[in-house]
């Protein structure tokens, strides 16, 4: 009995293998139409594949999008860094270009001051509370800078050395509200007219040239320069241009309002001017008790 059972199982196995081989051979033949078991098996397999592939594609797409997002973030970060570098470089180029222009102008100014000793300096400090009064430069007594020396830019006179230390100096600007700020000047016209820079109109941003005789002819557009009569400042330093003339409060003299040639607000490089040649003392013609700036 057991032997018969084993023979039956063997026979069933062999028949199954034969049927399977026959089915495989049958399915491999080129046919225009599949049998319904083959069609069912193919449809079932396709449905199962689509059922599995969609979640797989979704997950794969999600991770791909995350990767793209990370790449976009890194690229954006790098581009932002490059933009910041470009802005910084543009700022440095602008600063260097401006310094180059200032130094070229100052070099030309030095050539016109042959009768004076010139010392180039840079502004290193400025108090916001006294912006229109004092600046600090990086030259002092060790560089032969002394009190009351004239300080100019390429555009014109800005002030004087108020105090000098070993390596730095304080410069008092013409725009300082100091009644002792006086400088002997002359207006260039058909005839020279002398006066003194005394005071600054903060509202109009103009210098006040006082003690101009009432009968003197001072006109708008005339250039104002240092006269050199005080014996401290060299003659011929540009102060500014007359924009308005009015009588003083007593009606005895005139006051000329002068637009400064130099910009008191934006000062980077300056020249300290030391007068070398002494001219004949004409201060008595003006007032030898007057203190020049």
Image: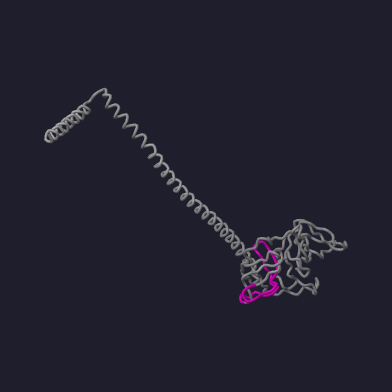
- Tell me if residue 156 is in the magenta stretch: yes
Q: Position of residue 283 (x, y in %)?
A: 78, 73
Left or right: residue 257 versus residue 165 is right
Judging depth in this view, the residue of 188 and 258 nearest the camera is: 258
Quadrant for residue 226, please give it: bottom right
Judging depth in this view, the residue of 80 and 172 nearest the camera is: 80
Q: Position of residue 189 (x, y in %)?
A: 76, 60
Q: Which residues make up the magenta segment?
A: 142-168
Q: Position of residue 228 (x, y in %)?
A: 73, 70
**Quarter of the picture holding the C terminus:** bottom right
**Quarter of the picture holding the N terminus:** top left
Number of on-image labels: 0
Judging depth in this view, the residue of 291 and 236 nearest the camera is: 291
Looking at this rendering, what residue extends furthest in the top direction?
A: 32
How are the residues colored?
one colour
Quadrant for residue 188, please give it: bottom right
């Amino acid at each position: 009995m057991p032997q018969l059972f084993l023979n039956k199982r063997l026979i069933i196995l062999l028949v199954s293998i034969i049927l399977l081989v026959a089915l495989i051979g049958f399915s491999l033949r080129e046919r225009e139409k599949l049998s319904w078991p083959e069609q069912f098996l193919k449809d079932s397999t396709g449905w199962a594949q689509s059922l599995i592939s969609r979640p797989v594609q979704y997950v794969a797409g999600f991770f791909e999008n995350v990767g793209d997002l990370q790449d976009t973030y890194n690229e954006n970060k790098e581009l932002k860094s490059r933009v910041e570098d470009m802005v910084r470089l543009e700022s440095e180029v602008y600063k260097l270009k401006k310094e180059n222009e200032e130094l070229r102008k100052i070099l030309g100014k030095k050539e016109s001051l042959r009768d004076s000793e010139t010392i180039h300096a840079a502004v290193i400090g400025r108090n916001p509370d006294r912006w229109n009064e004092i600046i600090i430069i990086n030259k002092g007594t060790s560089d032969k800078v002394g009190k009351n020396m004239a300080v100019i830019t390429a555009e014109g006179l800005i002030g004087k050395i108020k105090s000098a230390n070993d390596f730095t100096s304080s410069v008092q600007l013409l725009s300082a509200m100091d009644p002792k700020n006086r400088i002997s000047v002359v207006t260039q016209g058909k005839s020279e007219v002398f006066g003194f820079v005394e005071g600054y109109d903060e509202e109009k941003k103009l210098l006040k040239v006082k003690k101009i005789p009432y009968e003197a002819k001072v006109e708008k557009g005339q250039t104002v320069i240092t006269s050199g009569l005080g014996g401290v400042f060299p003659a011929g330093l540009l102060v500014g241009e007359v924009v308005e003339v009015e009588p003083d409060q007593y009606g005895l003299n005139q006051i000329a309002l002068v637009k400064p040639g130099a910009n008191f607000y934006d000062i980077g490089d300056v020249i300290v001017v030391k007068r070398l040649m002494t001219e004949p003392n004409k201060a008595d013609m003006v007032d030898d008790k007057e203190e020049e700036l």
